[in-house]
Amino acid sequence: MARGTPCILLAKRNVTLLRGRRDGLELIFSGRVLAEAFDELEARLSEQPSFYRGASAVANVGATIPSPEDLARLRALLASAGVALRALSGDGEELERLAQTEGLQFERAPSREPATRSRTPRPPDDVPLSDSARSLVADFAGARNDIASRRRRGEASVRRVKLEPESARTPHELRLVETPPTTLYHTVTLRGGQVLHHAGNIVIVGDVNPGAELIATGDILVFGRLAGIAHAGAQGDENARIYAVDLAATQLRIATFIAADDGVKRRGAPAPKVAVARDARIVIFPLAELPT
């Protein structure tokens, strides 16, 4: 049988009990007529004839002294289920002598003490107080004296907090906080007919093909070929710029300024360039030569 077998009730009246222990089984017959208890035990063992095979058992009979015939019947019942009777458990020297005579071990039942004991309460003056507790006692005594003196003066026991009226409070100054522009990162090439709008900066990792359009309130940066339309500073920011690794746009716009056709056609090998607004027009510089 496995160690730590769960308890198994043998009778609905919760009297005869078969439960597992670390060292085997425990049969509790205390307070029962042994003949009736044996009948119930026999019925239960017959339901599972091989479940307890190989286990040993301790019979707890309490103050009852079983006869040799009772022990013989109990041994036979257990043997039919493959269980060996190992020990008797209960009270009294007579039961211990019977166990020795029958070649069984003896386990003395633990003594039970009353659940409740009357205790004489200790006088309050004898209770020792820690330093922290003594300081609390002094604090409470001082608080009681303060309350008593307030009542004698006709004041409230607890000080009331005076709240300023809402109109007397200094209003908080309201300031407008401007949110800095955000940056939109787009990592896919824009095909002709696609339009990308953003309130802030636009960064394109890829190409902007002819017919595609970029519109940003801030700067525009293209890490690739800009061959479509780019409009930076769309809300009137003349300091906005347009950057591209290969600047070949069909039209550039910065704020209200526009450059197209010959003004933005690529000349020579592709090189990073930047378009800025200068003197009411759009000027394109090589990135390395951009004036400060």
Image (spheres, helix red, strand yellow):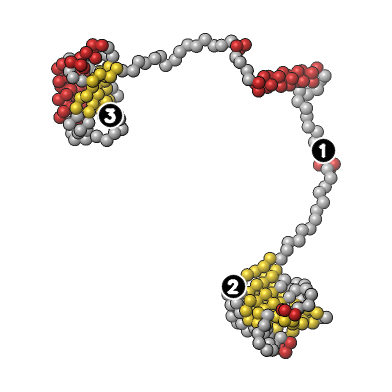
The CA span between labels 1 and 2 is: 58 Å
Mark 1 residue crowding within 10 angstroms, few (<14) / some (14–19) / many (20+):
few
Report the residue marked by disc 3: 23
Report the residue marked by disc 2: 187
Q: Is residue 182 left or right of residue 121?
A: right
Q: Is residue 145 left or right of residue 34?
A: right
* Element under disc 2: loop
Q: Does 21 appear above or below 292?
A: above
Mark 1 or mark 3: which comes first in sequence? 3
* Element under disc 1: loop
Q: Does 177 appear above or below 259?
A: above
Instruction: Give, as a three-letter code, the residue at label 3.
Output: Asp
The CA span between labels 1 and 3 is: 78 Å
Q: Residue at x 61, y 74 (%)?
A: 205
Quarter where residue 66 is shown: top left
Q: Residue at x 82, y 51 (%)?
A: 173
Regarding residue 228, the answer to whether it shows in the image is no
Q: Residue at x 24, y 34 (%)?
A: 1
Camera-side mark, 3 or 2: 3
Where residue 190 appears, as percent x and y from the top left, is 60, 78
Mark 3 residue crowding within 10 angstroms, few (<14) / some (14–19) / many (20+):
some
